[in-house]
Amino acid sequence: MPGLPPGIEAPPKDGEPGWASGLRKLYNSVVEEPLPDSFQDLLKKLDDSGDA
Amino acid sequence: MPERITPCPADESFRRELLTVLPHLRAFARGLCGRPDFADDLVQETAIKAWTARERYQAGTNMRAWTFAILRNHYLSELRRSRRQTDLDDGVAERLLIMEADQEAPLHLDDMEHALHQLAPERREAVLLIGASGFSYEEAAGIAGCPVGTMKSRVARARADLARILDSEPQKTIADSRAG
């Protein structure tokens, strides 16, 4: 195991590079956010249109 | 039978599927444009477009891929529209807004986001679809409307760019601070 300097995620030679998990983390951090209040109107619109 | 008063079951399941992809659409949109407010507008408009076009969706196919393609095309047409409407360079506005957003995000995600937005747009899109959203090359090519081989080379270039950007930046900072 190479000793990595703290704070630098150096890519392992044959495995997944460090940024690849960073990218997924970035993406998942948004996926996991609750929908903001601005979506309430949209959700309501989708609900209402069931009757149309 | 109360069938006629209940909403069409196909609509109902479409709506359920659409709701489950909203968080993914938000993540994709945020990755594409880097601006939370603009991204959320894109997602909402995408959801409306998808709902309006729901009869063209084939049940059992990939709702995520279908809606991602709608979002992507909508984003591109919004970009073209805003270029026509304003003299402000998109890139500059984007960078300014990213810098603002940076202040509250954790550091490593900051670096990631910053690096992502240094990529050429088609490479950013490619690496988001493959590396973050988890689509296959075939699905991603379908979403972006390009051949599979083109998608593969965009992803390879994006990966090389990201590795270079994220690898070189800390070293550059260290070198700079030594020099200063």
Image (tube, rainbow, N blue to C red):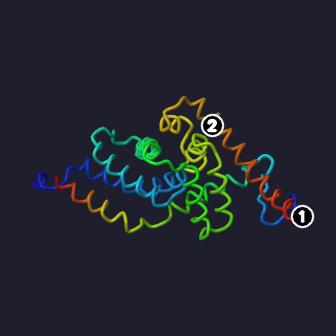
Residue B130 sits in quarter: top right
Q: Residues within 10 Å of mark 2 (few under 14, many from 20)?
A: some
Q: Are marks 2 and 1 on the same chain?
A: yes
Which of the pair B110/A10 is nearer the observer? B110
Question: Relative to residue A5, is residue B132 drawn left or right?
Answer: left
Q: Which structural element holds mark 2? A: helix
Q: Which structural element holds mark 1? A: helix
Residue shown at the point (58%, 59%) measured from the top left? B96
Residue shown at the point (56%, 44%) measured from the top left? B125
Residue A45 picture location, percent across and down: 26, 58
Residue A24 sits in quarter: bottom right
Q: Of tags 2 and 1, which is closer to the observer?
A: 1
Question: Relative to residue B16, is residue B155 drawn left or right?
Answer: right
Work out whether B7 lies above or below A36.
Answer: above
Work out whether B18 lies above or below A30.
Answer: above
Residue A29 image label: none
Q: Chain of mark 2?
A: B
The residue that disc 1 covers is B178
Residue shown at the point (84%, 60%) measured from the top left? B176
Question: Relative to residue B158, is residue A14 drawn left or right?
Answer: right
Ranked by sequence position, the earlier of labels 2 and 1 is 2
Q: Chain of mark 1?
A: B
Residue shown at the point (47%, 54%) measured from the top left? B24
The residue that disc 2 covers is B154
Q: Residues within 10 Å of mark 1 (few under 14, many from 20)?
A: few
- Placement of the N terminus of chain B among the 4 image quadrants: bottom left
Residue B18 picture location, percent across and down: 36, 52
Question: Relative to residue B70, is residue B114 drawn left or right?
Answer: right
Which of the pair B27/B93 is nearer the observer? B93
Residue B123 sits in quarter: top right
Q: CA distance from mark 2 to mark 1?
A: 36 Å
